[in-house]
Image (cartoon, grey):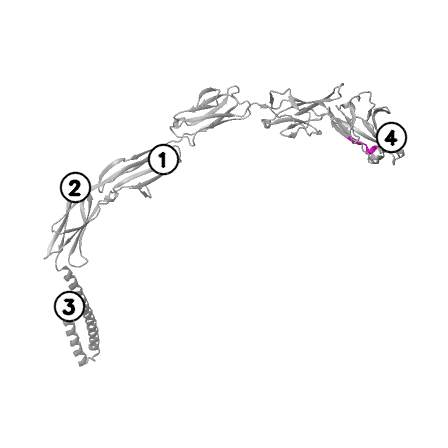
Amino acid sequence: MHLSASCVCALLISALFCQVTDLTTVSSLYGETVAIPCKNDDFKPEDVVMTKWKYDKGEGLSGDLLVKKTNEDAKISATDEYEGRVSMAENSSLLLSAAKLSDQRTFTCMIVAASDIKEYPINLEILKVPAGLEISDKAEELEIGKLTKLGTCVAQDTNPAANITWLKNNKPLEADGKRIVINQSLDVDPATGLSTTKSTLEYSAEKEDTDAQFTCSTGSFATGELVSPAVTLTVTYSTENIALQVNSQAPVVEGDNMTLKCVADGNPAPTSFNFHLKGELVKVENADIYTIVNVSRDTTGEYKCSLTDDPSMEASKNITVSYLDINLSPSGSIVKRAGDLLNVTLQIDSSAKSKVSWTKDNAKLDKEPKFAKLAYSDSGFYECEVTMGPLSRKALFELVVEGAPVIKKLHKQRTEDGKNQVLICEAEGSPKPAVSWSINGSLLTESPFVNGRITHKITVAPSENTTVSCTVSNEYGTDKDIIIVSPYDLESDQTKLVVGVVVGLLVAAVVIGLAYWVYMKKSKQGSWKTGEKEDGSSEEEKKLEEKVEENSQKAEV
């Protein structure tokens, strides 16, 4: 029974034969042995009398391959292209070796049982996967904006015919007829029936395509999708932008080396440049930098660089060389006389605004020192610091104020135990004055000589009233002052306190008496005018006058 007859039968009697829609397809790889199964689901093995395999030759004809009866070996009946290529497995599957494309047809397994006959058609599909994909005829480089053949991808000897897709960075490219043009061709080998697909990509690159990876791939086969090795091409383009850079620490200061660098975005990058150095043209080959050593403030100005093959493509930059100079007057060590005038001037020459700070003996000053009339306290080390960004300059001078010594104060005080006198002589002058006394005593302390001042203390125990002198002297002159000391200074001080209290009381009494006397006198005068003078008031007046007189005498004493 032929396949066409079984199909007709299937349409008429579905209970006896399979339907065409249930036709099973088996796939196998080209050149390998394929096992075509006999799907016998209707009979028990012991009921099978005979199994027969045949194939569809086309045009309604069938060809026998082999027959196997129960308890007998299979008999091969194939006499054409299948001779020597077919056999039967124990499970009744047809084994077909060296599968080729001409084997793509329907094979039918017929089962004969005691009660019925059934056929099981199987469609055979042969797959041939290309050995690999590779991009050939690759371009050496891609130029921006120019449609260029990038390469050809070939999938050789395949079945079914391969469909090639181009990818950039793993993303499919779609032909647009302008920037992306893809041409694909298909050739079939008449001997084997295998297909060879060729795909050519023409591509107009952009600057962003630098370092892009191009690949080609095929659709899915039984072994999966095939992808070619990636191809990376050089993208060339003319210089569109140029910039001049200064490769030096900012800011550029006098004495530095300044390196100019010309940066262009062309690919390949330009290798030769012109550097315009304030009117001077310097051509640099195979380099993009030029260094100016030991720059000065005169280096400040406009600088340019350009392409040697296109001078109109240029870049410029204004460069300022920072500088800071100071001149302090006076400087070094200065000796001046007390009371003199000293002018301090600081001259600053800088490329930008600067900041000035002053210190005296390492202590910060709030403002610039001015000396209209020098005092000994003005002596010291003065330092100014001028800063401008990272630049800093310092200058200093030492001021020494000298003059004849002068005793500012000479006084005395008792010791804590009240037994001795402490004489204190305070003087100023410079150089440090020598201090001497006209009385022998024990040196108690001598203060440090600071800002032209010195304090000298001695302890004395006078036995009688004595005039003591303190003398100070240096190379400019001498000064002297005296003070009287007495052994009774302590007692005299106590007596003065008591006398003071008594005198105070007497004065108070006199004041009260006088006030009362004035009052009575005014009253008496009023009485005389009215003619009502009394004898008793005259007597009281006399007593008051006597009291006032007595108090006055006591006050004088």
Sequence-earlier tag: 2 or 4: 4
502 inside magenta stretch: no
Badge 4 is on which residue? 6
Residue 529 appears anywhere in the view:
yes
Q: Quadrant of the C terminus?
A: bottom left
Labelled disc at residue 392: 1
Residue found at the far front of this picture: 71
Eye-nearest disc, 2 or 1 = 1
21 inside magenta stretch: yes
- Asked if residue 227 lies left or right of residue 257, the reply is right
Front position in the image: 487 or 167: 167
Residue 150 appears anywhere in the view:
no
Picture quarter containing residue 94? top right
Q: Distance from label 2 to label 3 (Cα)?
A: 53 Å
Badge 3 is on which residue? 555
Q: Amino acid at mark 1?
A: Ser
Q: Distance from label 4 to label 3 (Cα)?
A: 170 Å
Badge 2 is on which residue? 476
Magenta residues (range): 20-25
Q: Position of residue 340 (x, y in %)?
A: 23, 41
Q: Quadrant of the N terminus?
A: top right
Q: Position of residue 362 (x, y in %)?
A: 30, 41
Q: Position of residue 421 (x, y in %)?
A: 15, 56
Secondary structure category for the residue under label 2: loop
Q: Amino acid at mark 4?
A: Ser
